[in-house]
Image: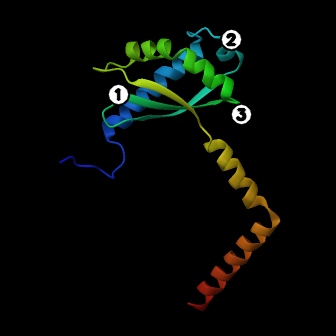
Amino acid sequence: MSKQSAKGPSQRQLRVAEEIRQALSYALERGDIYDPELSRRPITVTKVDLSPDMRNAMVAVTPLGGGDAKPTLEALKRQKGILRSHVANSVHMKYVPALRFVEDTSFDISDHIGELLRDPHVAQDLSSDHESDDHDKEDD
């Protein structure tokens, strides 16, 4: 019977994922990969998630400055083999994980949340909640 864990990634997974992220970032920064789309604008590798068996890596990327990430993702998929060999040379593992590139939308989400919090109606609600908390503390 297999034991499924609801816990997060292990320390080893986190350490290896960070090493893979740094290796990919370094290869893209130095320009080791020749692709017109990849040389057009810088790419930020924001996160790497490893599967529990460490054979698959999901690499979250975003073009620096935002914009359409689709051409960048296509270029990364074309250069997947070369990037994987850079990881193999930099991170010493028994098996080099297969790389899967996805767009990191966390910056867009945080911008949207910031816009919502700056909305006058929301700010009014937040200030009234803060004032009621102050009154409750005075009553104690």
Residue under the point 46% across and 20% down: 23
Crowding at mark 1 (Cα within 10 Å: few <14, some 14-19, many 20+): few
Q: Residue at coordinates 35% horizontally, 28% vertically from top-left?
A: 55
Q: Nearer the viewer, mark 1 or mark 3?
A: 1
- Per the rendering, the mark at residue 132 is none
> Label for residue 36?
2
- Which residue lies at the image location 36% right of the left edge and 20% below the top edge? 96
Q: Amino acid at mark 2?
A: Pro
Nearer-N-terminus badge (2/1): 2
Work out whether 138 lies above or below 56. Answer: below
| Residue 40 position by quadrant | top right
Depth check, front residue: 140 or 32: 32
Q: Which residue is mark 1?
A: 55
User: Colour scheme used in the picture?
Assistant: rainbow
The residue at the far front in this view is 1
Q: Which residue is mark 3?
A: 66
**x and y, in percent, of residue 47 in the image:** 51, 35
